[in-house]
Amino acid sequence: MKKLFGTDGVRGVANVHPMTTEIAMQLGRAAAYIFKNGGRRRHRIVIGKDTRLSGYMIENALVAGICSMGVDVLLVGPLPTPGIANITCSMRADAGVVISASHNPFQDNGIKFFSPDGFKLPDEIELKIEKLMETGKIDSLRPTASEVGKAFRIDDATGRYIVFLKNTFPQDMDLSGMKIVLDCANGAAYKVAPAVLEELGAEVVPLGVKPNGTNINKGCGSTHPEVISDAVKSCRADIGIALDGDADRVIVCDEHGNAVDGDHIMAICATDMLKRKLLKKKTVVATVMSNMGLDIAVRNAGGKVVKTSVGDRYVVEEMRKKGYNLGGEQSGHMIFLDYSTTGDGILSALQLLAVMRREEKPLSELACIMSPLPQILINVRVKERKNIMDFHEIASLVKNVERNLGDRGRVLIRYSGTEPLLRIMIEGEDAGEIGKCGGEIADIVALRLGGAVETKGAPR
């Protein structure tokens, strides 16, 4: 069992275990040891971050740990998570490190690693890193003199990533005549995303592009789609695009301000790829959180959907293992494996914009391809993670709900991999029924686990 790494790296409140400078330095030392490939050349690890205040502190601790193992560091500064994966590959570095807590509030932070090929680390490598930290096996390894690592700043990393993103958009198209509301969440994409869309010819209405270290994700970005919805309607824009703090996910809204989530985007892009015979094995990879409406839409277009556990890393693992090229999550993590090794919010938005251009249709019309079943997601903030099925009262209620829904819906209950939350998702044909059932389950869970109900969304 991993003790530090969750579903997406190490994450927590900055300057509180495990997100301390001491742990960051140890992580840097252990990762540097593992990613040294032998030979006489200098080894290099890329480090990038989002705009959180604590990023400076953690960055310096990581640099110290990596350099202390005789490995050089390439600093790229604030850059989207997928941009760091891209730079790691293009510069032939030995690994990449991202300092970010994604969509979490600014007081949190996280550390996640990419392997040389730009993919997130498998569980066994993360376990090796933890083992090295626990055993102290590398404590005595202390290069000296000229063998100590150095740190370099890569000033053109932003430009390199912008060029890469533009090259994923069809060469025979541009975005001239389109008005786009863009919310960068005061995060890592605040420079990159507006530049990409403007250089492709769009008129951009930028929001969330003034980070100050503490306003990342605050009332903006993909977790607050109402911001782009209001702006699209007031500006009469063609589309609204909202990224999260590290820009690996995207949520959009159509020209009427209606939200279009990851499931809808995958349905639109999968249908387009099926038409052009580009969807490998006619298959989309999604997670168990995706709406059943996605399965229906893809099936109607001649394809199929396979499901994985929650987490974009598990989606990518399934895609690589079976040879698929499109996958993602309802939350807006989407992987277009023909272009990128990880979820990329800007790249995903560009693929959606390309379909709009190709079909010459507004997003509202394209989104009609999928009719989602009503679904509710309720979060319960808990003090301690316990197996809820050990509580007879909870288990009995869940079984009764599942029995009543039958094959017309489903219940999915799981703990978040990044926050102290129990997530309750119910899907069914009757919005009123699932709302009532979700509330009952959430209330009894909060009572028995000593938590507080945080309703994420009404039935939709």
Image (cartoon, rainbow, N blue to C red):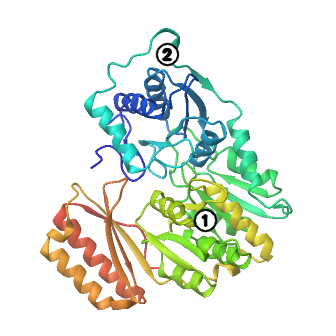
**In this orientation, which residue lies closer to the viewer: 411 or 119?**
119
Tell me the distance, in whole angstroms, between the alpha carbons under discs 2 and 1: 41 Å
**Residue at the spot 55% in from the left edge and 54% down from the top edge:** 244
Residue at mark 2? 148
Where, by quadrant of the figure, is residue 333 drawn? Answer: bottom right
The spot of residue 335 in percent (x, y) is: 58, 60
The spot of residue 96 in percent (x, y) is: 53, 38
Task: Indicate the secondary structure of the residue bearing disc 2.
Answer: loop
Residue at mark 1? 325
- The vertical placement of 320 against 19, above or below, is below
**Residue at the spot 52% in from the left edge and 19% down from the top edge:** 149
Query: How busy is the neighbourhood of tag 2: few (under 14 within 10 Å), some, or many (20 plus)?
Result: some
Task: Indicate the secondary structure of the residue bearing disc 1.
Answer: loop
Query: How busy is the neighbourhood of tag 1: few (under 14 within 10 Å), some, or many (20 plus)?
Result: many
**Residue at the spot 55% in from the left edge and 80% down from the top edge:** 304
Answer whether residue 282 is visible to the viewer in this image: yes
**The disc labelled 2 sits on which kind of residue?**
Val
Where, by quadrant of the figure, is residue 137 drawn? Answer: top left
The spot of residue 312 in percent (x, y) is: 48, 59
In the displayed structure, does residue 13 sit left or right of residue 301?
Answer: left
**In this orientation, which residue lies closer to the viewer: 112 or 438?**
112
**In this orientation, which residue lies closer to the viewer: 397 or 69?**
69
In the displayed structure, does residue 152 sit left or right of residue 37?
Answer: right
